[in-house]
Image (tube, rainbow, N blue to C red):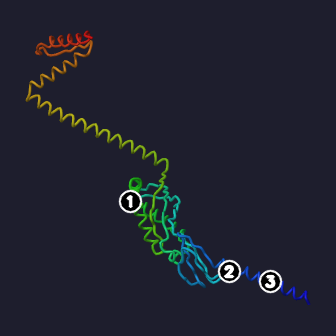
Amino acid sequence: MQWSIFQIEAASIVGIVFLIIILVVILASAIKIIREYERAVVFRLGRLLGAKGPGVILIIPIIDRTRIVDLRVITLDIPKQRVITKDNVTADVDAVLYFRVRDPLNAIVKVQDYVVASSMIAQTTLRDVLGQVEFDDLLTKRDELNKRIQGIIDEVTDPWGIKVTAVAIRDITIPESMQRAIAKQAEAERERRGRIIMADGELQAAKKMQEAAEYYVKNPSALRLRELQTWAEIAREKNLIVVTEGSTQSLGSMLGLMKSLREKEKVEP
């Protein structure tokens, strides 16, 4: 009889312990800790209950289901897309998409997987937009194209509760044959600009020479001074024979005087 009572008490203790364990498990599953940058979308028996958090929230085990949504900016790498531009240039374009969840309820209810959906719409938009521009614009107008792509993606993902913060075209790869053609084009462009600059310089110099000639005509004394300066520069050269017109007066004496002055300067310490 005593043994039976002992068995009953032991079974009761085991049952109580088991019940306590079950209660602890249920309580642990009922308590959720949501971080500051997260929200918990709660479904009760399949019906949307709302978004909760941050902090500690209570849910009913088995009855409630939760989906945790991260509100931070997500960096999504858009795989390389083969793009044919408006002028029939084939290029592989790689881009990066930055977005965040603005409305956790729509991000869960309106779309099955908002990350995959955003990636797919980004790839499609990238090909469509870049296929409408020429290759030169693709290289020189990246900022404008980034904003254009961002606006289109943001408009599509807005009903999903997604806000696109930025789109950046990261890399553009073209075939090697096209690279050689672009290099030749750039070289020809540089040569053209160089010739234009030289021609413009010659034109400006000719205009200045014309102005100088007109000034010398009006001022013969200035022309004479310029002539003397020229002879002085010629006198610096050694073993140089100068042939002039016979009408040039006192040229020999002037050159001799300049030569003697220079020799005197060399002799003096």
Please state if 35 lies on the left or on the right of 5 as rendered: left
- Residue 23 marker: none
Whichever of labels 1 and 3 marks the residue nearer the N terminus, that label is 3
How dense is the environment of label 3, judged by Cα within 10 Å: few (below 14), some, or many (20 and up)? few
Residue for point 87% across, 88% down: 5
When asked about the image quadrant of residue 19, the answer is bottom right
In the depicted view, which residue is nearer to us: 166 or 223? 166
Q: Check residue 13 in the rendering and tell me which mark sits there, or answer none.
A: 3
Residue 23 appears in which quarter of the rendering? bottom right
Q: Amino acid at mark 2?
A: Ile
In-front residue for pair 15/80: 15
Name the N-terminal-most of marks 2 and 1: 2
Q: Earlier in the sequence, mark 3 or mark 2?
A: 3
Tell me the number on the disc at residue 26: 2
Disc 1 marks a residue whose amino acid type is Glu
Instruction: Name the front one of labels 2 and 1.
Output: 2
Separation (CA) of disc 3 from disc 2: 20 Å
Instruction: Name which residue lies at 26% across and 9% down.
Output: 267
Classify mark 2: helix, strand or loop. Answer: helix
Could you tell me residue 10's position as x and y percent?
84, 83
The quadrant the C terminus occupies is top left
- Where's residue 9, x and y in %? 83, 86
